[in-house]
Image: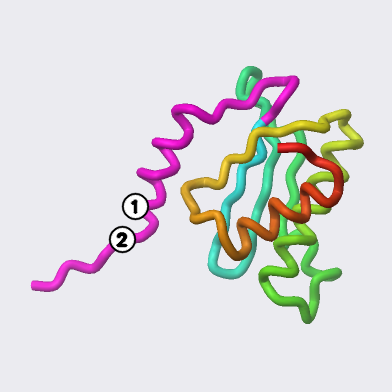
Amino acid sequence: MINKLNKNADRKVRHARVRKKVFGTSVKPRLCVYRSTNYIYAQIIDDVNGNTLCASSSLALAKTLEGKTKVEAAKAVGQDIATKATQLGVSEVVFDRGGYIYTGRVAALADGAREAGLKF
């Protein structure tokens, strides 16, 4: 019998391994990324207090992102989350890639956030 690989289960194992070391504080919160098949989501989280400071997604920005590719949408989400963070007074974050490989949409989101002024 052929066993089908469960890629999301493997990603969750990688994410748990990374989360042992990546921790967000109120001074330097965690920028968490979740990538679904159609959209990409980003949150800035203070792990000490357990609060989500701000969030953005390509689903929330769907009206402005019509006709753009997923990578372009991810970059726009990165820029949006960075502007929201700077309005809250957050300039530095810890990047949590969520167990995903740092390429494509995840890298585009990080680049967009860096261009808008966030420091990792």
What is the number of the mark on residue 6?
2
- The answer to whether 20 appears left or right of 7 in the picture is right
Pick the quarter of the image with the N terminus.
bottom left
User: Which picture quadrant has residue 46?
Assistant: top right
Which of the 4 image quadrants contains residue 15? top left
Q: Magenta residues?
A: 1-29
| Amino acid type at image mark 1 | Ala
Q: Quadrant of the C terminus?
A: top right
Q: Judge from the rendering whether residue 105 lies leftward or rightward of residue 118; answer left or right.
A: left
Q: Are marks 2 and 1 in contact (CB under 8 Å)?
A: yes
Which residue corresponds to mark 1? 9
Question: What residue lies at 76% left-to-right and 53% top-to-bottom?
Answer: 78
Calculate the distance from the C-alpha at mark 2 to the C-alpha at mark 1: 5 Å
| Residue 6 image offset from top left, x and y in percent | 31, 61
Q: Position of residue 26 (x, y in %)?
A: 72, 20
Of 55 and 77, which appears nearest the observer? 77
